[in-house]
Image (cartoon, rainbow, N blue to C red):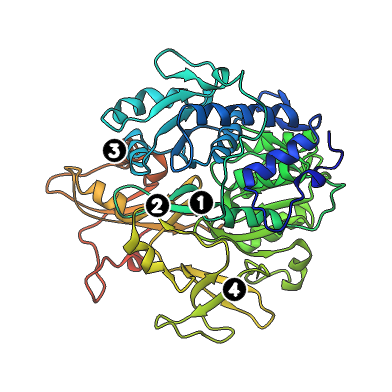
């Protein structure tokens, strides 16, 4: 047994150790510490978590799943989801998550598009399997296995099958340029576009911690949002740093507040709309929040007034994180920096991380001076490898190592980055991303819809909502609930419009595109 987990992960400069291997080394270094608490309150030690992941990695390799393979996860916020991700990484396979909130046809298309060889399902998603699995039939049908006992007809329990395997690293050589995984975001190609990430960029996150807390203060993270998104990355960092993770199935503000007090949570990640739910919950005034050291927020636009309110309620623990799947981390605003921006006015997303370059450019590529708005371009070692099987789209956003983020922003004289708008026609909602074109193309197949335009509307708290303007087919008058049900059935609930506006015509810009700015201004919110 190694007394200090940092001793276990020390390595020569020339040796590359992947993030999954690094995390498991730190877990085995202190095997008796509590690593994960499940939503049902079951505590898992670091040693047991590592041993299960090592055994599963050996089992996957024995079944032919290794370098070049794709392991797709239909999982929730479970220990098994963490185990499967680490095991697949150790085996050299790329990992893909199937997000909750998408319809079975979309999940099936994603599964096929990433060349899935193995689909792993956990108990939180067993209910989704009957609708998905028949859609995977065909010559390239992936093997389907379960991460624990499951109802008949889904697949064999691969955790049980791996029990006799050795609890040690299988030693598969993994390099920094090998595929780590494919993350999906909204897209206009019929299914969400896949963002290919490599082991090297993700591994670099562990070399530059997000804060300067010492090793004597291991984080205790509450993962109340999906491990398939940023909570998963933060869980990895917490476990690597000798900390622990408390899992919740989904975000419920009352349960989150109770867990913070009960579990003495130090770290939490939220999207701004979820932060507002905490602020508005009646229990926030009586909850012991003294253990909190860091609340990270980001992922969509936030209301400066509500963020300032959160600072007053939670204390100087808020951290603005600006990043994206294509670039991981870009900029951050630390707790001690908020006072300099006063009690009103805009708040920046932060200063770029030391290892990240950010440039503000005009449409012609000219770099703009301080204070002028332009397109935000980013260059760092953490930029994506590209969009999966979409070289033309990749070429549109990647140029000489620089990523065009699709955001509009500007710098102030002190080097703080502000975001003003998005160039991309993207709606960021709680749970994912919605590209209007996807929903528009679907709605045009509805018999009651002649023309339509889908756009995002921000409320007073800067949360985005999906709106649709519809020109009805002759003699028809579609209703919101009917349209919502139609979209949900085909695409999933995160795509469903929250407001329907019936109009005589869709206004057009001078170049003939739907004028969504005019729609936002003319139609009620």
User: Depth-wise, is mark 1 or mark 3 nearer the camera?
Assistant: 1
Residue beneath label 2, please? 186
Q: Please say if the residues under marks 4 and 1 sit with CB atoms less than 8 Å apart.
A: no
Q: CA distance from mark 2 to mark 3?
A: 19 Å
Name the residue tied to disc 3: 486
- Percent of width and height locating residue 7: 82, 46
The mark that comes first in sequence, 4 or 1, is 1
Q: CA distance from mark 4 to mark 2?
A: 25 Å
Q: Secondary structure at mark 2?
A: loop
- Element type at mark 3: helix
Question: Looking at the image, which is closer to me, 362 or 525?
Answer: 362
Residue 337's x, y, as percent? 75, 68
Decide: few, some or many residues near mark 3? Use Cα within 10 Å; few <14, some 14-19, many ≥20.
some
Q: Quadrant of the N terminus?
A: top right
Marks 1/3: CA distance?
Answer: 40 Å
Q: Nearer the viewer, residue 147 or 92?
A: 92
The residue that appears at 31% across and 55% down in the rendered structure is: 188
Which residue of the protein is positioned furthest toward the left in this rendering?
474
Cα distance in 3D space between marks 2 and 1: 24 Å
């Amino acid at each position: 047994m190694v007394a200090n987990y940092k001793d276990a992960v020390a390595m020569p400069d020339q040796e590359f150790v992947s993030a999954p291997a690094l995390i498991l080394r730190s877990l085995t270094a202190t095997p008796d510490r509590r690593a994960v608490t499940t939503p049902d309150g079951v505590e898992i030690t670091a040693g047991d978590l590592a041993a299960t992941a090592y055994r599963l990695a050996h089992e996957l390799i024995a079944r032919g799943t290794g370098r070049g393979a794709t392991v797709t996860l239909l999982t929730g916020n479970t220990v098994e989801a963490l185990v499967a991700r680490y095991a697949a990484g150790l085996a050299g396979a790329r990992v893909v998550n199937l997000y909750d909130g998408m319809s079975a046809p979309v999940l099936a298309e994603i599964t096929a598009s990433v060349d899935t060889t193995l689909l792993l399902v956990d108990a939180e998603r067993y209910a989704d399997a009957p609708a998905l699995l028949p859609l995977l039939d065909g010559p390239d049908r992936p093997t389907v296995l379960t991460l624990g006992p499951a109802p008949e007809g889904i697949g064999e329990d691969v955790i049980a099958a791996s029990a006799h395997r050795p609890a040690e690293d299988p030693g598969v050589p993994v390099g920094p340029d090998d595929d780590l995984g494919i993350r999906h975001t909204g897209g206009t190609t019929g299914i969400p576009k896949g963002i290919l990430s490599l082991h090297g960029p993700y591994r670099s996150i562990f070399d530059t911690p997000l804060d300067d807390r010492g090793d004597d203060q291991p984080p205790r993270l509450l993962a109340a949002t999906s491990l398939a998104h940023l909570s998963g990355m933060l869980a990895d960092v917490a476990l690597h740093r000798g900390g622990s993770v408390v899992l919740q199935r989904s975000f419920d503000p009352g349960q989150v507040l109770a867990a913070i007090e009960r579990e003495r949570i130090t770290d939490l990640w939220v999207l701004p709309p979820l932060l507002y739910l905490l602020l508005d919950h009646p229990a926030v005034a009586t909850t012991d929040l003294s253990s909190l050291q860091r609340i990270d927020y980001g992922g969509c636009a936030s209301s400066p007034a509500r963020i300032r309110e959160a600072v007053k309620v939670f204390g100087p623990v808020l951290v603005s994180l600006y990043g994206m799947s294509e670039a991981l981390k870009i900029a951050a605003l630390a707790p001690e920096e908020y006072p300099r921006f006063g009690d009103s006015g805009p708040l920046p997303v932060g200063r770029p991380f030391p290892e990240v370059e950010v440039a503000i450019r005009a449409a012609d590529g000219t770099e703009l001076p301080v204070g002028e708005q332009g397109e935000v371009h980013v260059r760092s070692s953490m930029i994506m490898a590209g969009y999966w099987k979409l070289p033309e789209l990749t070429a549109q956003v990647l140029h000489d190592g620089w990523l065009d983020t699709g955001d509009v922003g500007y710098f102030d004289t002190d080097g703080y980055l502000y975001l003003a708008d998005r160039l991309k026609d993207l709606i960021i909602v709680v749970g994912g991303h919605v590209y209007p074109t996807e929903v528009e193309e679907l709605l045009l197949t509805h018999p009651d819809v002649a023309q339509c335009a889908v756009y995002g509307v921000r409320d007073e708290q800067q949360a985005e909502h999906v709106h649709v303007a519809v020109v009805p087919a002759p003699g028809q008058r579609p209703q919101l609930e009917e349209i919502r049900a139609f979209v949900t059935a085909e695409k999933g609930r995160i795509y469903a419009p929250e407001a329907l506006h019936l109009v005589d015509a869709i206004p057009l810009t001078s170049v003939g595109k739907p004028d969504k700015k005019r729609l936002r201004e003319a139609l009620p919110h």
